[in-house]
Image (spheres, grey):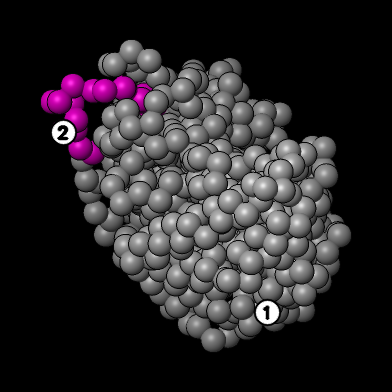
Amino acid sequence: MVPGATLHGLGVSPGVAVAPVAQLGEAIAEPAAADEVPEDRREAEAARLAPAVAEVVAALRADAARSEGETAQILEATALLAADPDFAAGAAARVRAEGVSAARAVWDEAEAQARLLRDLGGRMAERVADVRSVRDRLVARLTGADVPGIPDRAEPFVLVARDLAPAETAALGRSRCVALVTEEGGPTSHTAILARALGIPAVVGAAGATAIPAETVVLVDGESGTVQLDPPERQRAATSEDPPEFDGRGQLADGTPVTLRANVGGAVDAHAAAAARAQGIGLFRTEFCFLDRAAEPTVPEQVAAYRGVLAPFAGRTVVVRTLDAGSDKPLPFATGADEENPALGVRGLRVARTHPALLSHQLTAIADAAAQEGAEVEVMAPMVATVDEARDFVAACRAAGIARAGIMIETPAAALLSAEMLAVVDFVSLGTNDLTQYTMAADRLSAPLGALNDPWQPAVLRLIGTVGAAGRARGKPVGVCGEAGGDPAIAPVLVGLGVTSLSMTARSLARVAARLRTVTADECRRAAEAALGAPTAVEARAAAAAVLG
Ligand code: PEP
Ligand code: MG
């Protein structure tokens, strides 16, 4: 690639960062079983194991020493697993008895251990991922391959990948990654959402990114969606400007209140949201607490996770969403691996059809956590399509002792039936990410379809308008918790369409609040009408801008 060349993608998380590239390590290939080691070379092959184990253990301990808190503990525990003498002895015995390579012996020994742990179930089963992580590190040492997953580096780096699995994205927060570039993924993919939550610039859909040689210095601009290779020195000094502060009161220029809340995935986000003066939590994505779990978390484990989010919001509203498993957020204990079309499959509330106990356990845990903390807890279900689903969900919440129950509007069916939905629920919240993908029939993860996944698409705006009108008619709250809620450009239009609260990553609060302070309720309504009348997304945006200036 030419120095100074620029790759173009979609900017999905603002900010500018400059650092050397580290590519996401590809999954380790299973070592061949067929190549037999001759008898007279087996001892030498088995002897390769001890130094590889020692190197892996040392690397893990060094990482642990550089880390803090939970991360350090996890790395220490993984180092202990790698240092287990029974593991190395078992692998060496396989080399001697079966004549397999050291790498293959490690693979087979790890699989045998993983099977054992899986059969034991519960907490033990969750160690399977740790065993495989040690396996991959060892096989990488023995075969000279790159260690898979997020690179362990002491210096800042830009992570480049084809795309990231949710668990990998979650691990990003513990790394020195300062920006993210992927070849695939769309603007509302969870990679994009997490990048925004971490506050690092991100560009998705950057064709050719995985061909950038490791260590090339790149300048990532998460606003314009560009990735510049080997930028000139003066540009390397580029920094992102700090947003203004949010004073904790969302309102329009004429004083009309618009509640501004935060989207969170766990306690760390919740503390950041409280520090950013969010007026509550508008979306707690509970599945983010359990992405790496093989088995259903127990009710006490769930209570502990939920309390961590409720605690900083005593006296304020926290909208807890029940598990949104499935599609691009598979949870092994909730979803099948073999769905052909998982975005249209058993996801969100639909999981209650196949695993009803998951929902009842979760509602019990949420009610318990709410009883122990002072937050005003509301609960909502994702991926609702029928009024019966909404009614059953509300009944299940009431039975668990939860006073306020609502649903997300993420399907065109739910939007079209919003008047009937609002007759049975206490509130609704527009999941504009999914509502857009299902309205436009365009996978939200697809980079080439990024332009279709745009909430300015008139078909999407009209559905939002239907929901807003139903909310006004019933006098019930209508929120937005999809990514559109954190976009200062569309926020006035959403308010004009009848939306009463917006929820977003805490980092967007200040910009959205500042924009809303510049417009009146009447201007918002006129901008919404102008956008609704436009035939295309580009014209809708322009029509609103013409009203709002
Ligand atoms: C949405 O779909 O807009 C939403 C907020 O839910 P998620 O992004 O978690 O699917
Ligand atoms: Mg959704």
Q: Residue at x 52, y 39 (%)?
A: 145
Relative depth, front residue between 110 and 367: 110
The quarter of the displayed image where residue 203 is located:
top left
Residue positioned most to the left: 234
Residue 376 place in picture, x, y as percent: 52, 75
| Quadrant placement of the N terminus | top left
Distance between the Cα atoms at labels 1 and 2? Answer: 49 Å
Judge whether residue 279 can be spotted in this image.
no
Q: Magenta segment range?
A: 222-240
Is tag 1's residue or tag 2's residue first in the polypeptide sequence? 2
Judge whether residue 441 can be spotted in this image.
yes
Kind of residue sitting beneath label 1: Val
1 and 2 marks in contact (CB < 8 Å): no
Relative depth, front residue between 257 and 85: 85
**Disc 2 target residue:** 237
Q: Residue at x 58, y 85 (%)?
A: 371
Kind of residue sitting beneath label 2: Ala
Residue 32 place in picture, x, y as percent: 72, 39
Q: Residue at x 41, y 24 (%)?
A: 212
Relative depth, front residue between 313 and 109: 109
**Disc 1 target residue:** 299
The quarter of the displayed image where residue 90 is located:
bottom right
| Quadrant placement of the C terminus | top left
When the figure is inspected, residue 8 is found, relative to residue 277, above or below; the finding is above
